[in-house]
């Protein structure tokens, strides 16, 4: 396990309800290509802060890496709705582009 993951897990032991730490843990798991753990961490961040657009984007990246297309499509749609509402343009545009590619692949 990476040092970064261990550090973030220690922080979560002190404050398990911090969405930003769960988000960071999702990123650390993603860097380690531990995608299932990344999905769980991002979902926890979203559970704690439903309007956390970056966590929605992170979740979509992890689901894409796992090849879970149906879940990915649903997560992208939810993430785009959240990002549109909050005005978080960069992750929202990235999710829109991913959904567009996914829909194009399905049509081909």
Image (spheres, rainbow, N blue to C red):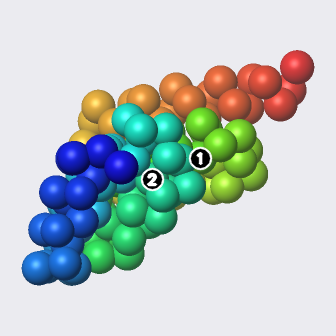
Instruction: Name the residue at 41% across, 38% down.
Output: 32
Indicate the position of residue 11 as horizontal and vertical percent values. Answer: 13, 68
Front position among marks 1 and 2: 2
Q: Relative to 72, say whether 9 is above or below.
A: below
Residue depicted at x 61% and y 38%: 64
Q: Residues within 10 Å of mark 1 (few under 14, many from 20)?
A: many
Dot 2: within a 10 Å radius of its alpha carbon, few (fewer than 14), some, or many (20 or more) residues? many
66 or 71, which lies in front? 66
Q: Residue at x 19, y 78 (%)?
A: 13
Q: Is residue 92 left or right of residue 95?
A: left
Residue drawn at x 83%, y 31% as measured from the top left: 106
Q: Position of residue 8 (x, y in %)?
A: 20, 59
C-alpha gap between disc 1 and disc 2: 9 Å
| Residue that extends furthest to the right in the rendered view of this protein | 108
Q: Secondary structure at mark 1?
A: helix
Q: Residue furthest top?
A: 108
- The residue tagged 2 is 38
Task: Judge whether 21 appears above or below 101 on screen.
Answer: below
Residue bearing mark 1:
63
Q: Earlier in the sequence, mark 1 or mark 2?
A: 2
Query: Considering the image in quadrants, where does the C terminus appear?
Result: top right
Q: Are marks 1 and 2 in contact (CB under 8 Å)?
A: no
Left or right: where does residue 102 sit relative to residue 15?
A: right
Tell me if residue 15 can be seen. Answer: yes
């Amino acid at each position: 396990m990476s040092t970064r993951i261990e550090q973030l897990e220690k922080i979560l032991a002190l404050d398990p309800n911090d969405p930003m730490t769960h988000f960071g843990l999702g990123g650390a798991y993603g860097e380690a290509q531990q995608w299932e753990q990344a999905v769980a961490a991002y979902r926890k961040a979203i559970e704690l802060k439903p309007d956390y657009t970056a966590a929605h984007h992170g979740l979509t990246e992890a689901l894409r890496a796992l090849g879970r297309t149906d879940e990915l499509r649903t997560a992208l749609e939810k993430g785009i709705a959240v990002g549109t509402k909050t005005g978080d343009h960069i992750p929202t545009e990235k999710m829109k582009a991913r959904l567009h590619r996914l829909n194009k692949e399905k049509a081909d």
